Image (cartoon, rainbow, N blue to C red):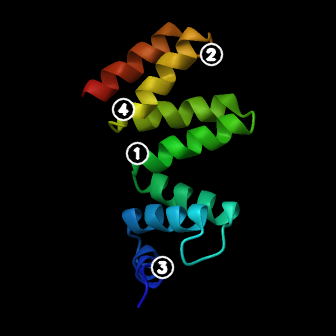
Amino acid sequence: SSAFEYYTKAAGLGDTEAHYWLSLLYQNGHGVEKEMRKVIHHWEEAAIGGHPRARHNLGWHEGNNGRYERALKHYIISAAQGQDESITTLMEKFKEGFVQKDELAAALRAHKA
């Protein structure tokens, strides 16, 4: 039995971490054909289940597609879940003028909590 089969079965049972690992398999083409639509699906499922890295990755994806408000929301949620990289991204976006001071302050407070 392959990692893909194991993760697929676990994801089918609602395992958030399995969804995240499936996203990586599809993103990198490990044992499956690379397929961005499935990467995003598994990021979404993992993020809904509370996976901070998947949520951060959704922010990255939305930002790359010009949906900055959606990206910002993903980064704020991910930062509140403890994802350090999301805090770094929010600080960069603040310096670039895309994030308001109060939004950054709230994200930093949530991240510390």
Q: Is residue 21 above or below residue 110?
A: below
Q: Which residue is mark 1?
A: 52
Q: Which residue is mark 2?
A: 98
- CA gap, disc 2 and disc 4: 19 Å
Q: Which residue is mark 4?
A: 84
Give the secondary structure at mark 4. helix
Residue 47 pos. (x, y %) = 47, 52
Which residue is farthest bottom? 1
Q: Which residue is mark 3?
A: 4
Q: Are marks 2 and 1 in contact (CB under 8 Å)?
A: no
**In this picture, residue 71 sits left or right of residue 67:** left
Residue at x 42%, y 79% (from the top left corner): 3
| Dot in front, 1 or 3 | 3
Q: Are marks 3 and 4 in contact (CB under 8 Å)?
A: no
Q: Quadrant of residue 79?
A: top left
Which of the two labelled residues, at mark 2 and mark 4, occupies the earlier sequence position?
4
Q: Quadrant of residue 35?
A: bottom right
Which of the two labelled residues, at mark 3 and mark 2, occupies the earlier sequence position?
3
Q: Are marks 1 and 3 in contact (CB under 8 Å)?
A: no
| Dot in front, 2 or 4 | 4
Residue 71 pos. (x, y %) = 61, 34
Q: Quadrant of residue 18?
A: bottom left
- Specify few, some or many for label 4: CA neighbours under 10 Å numbering under 14, 14-19, or 20 or more: some
**In this picture, residue 65 sits left or right of residue 61:** right
- CA gap, disc 3 and disc 2: 38 Å
Residue at x 57%, y 45% (from the top left corner): 58
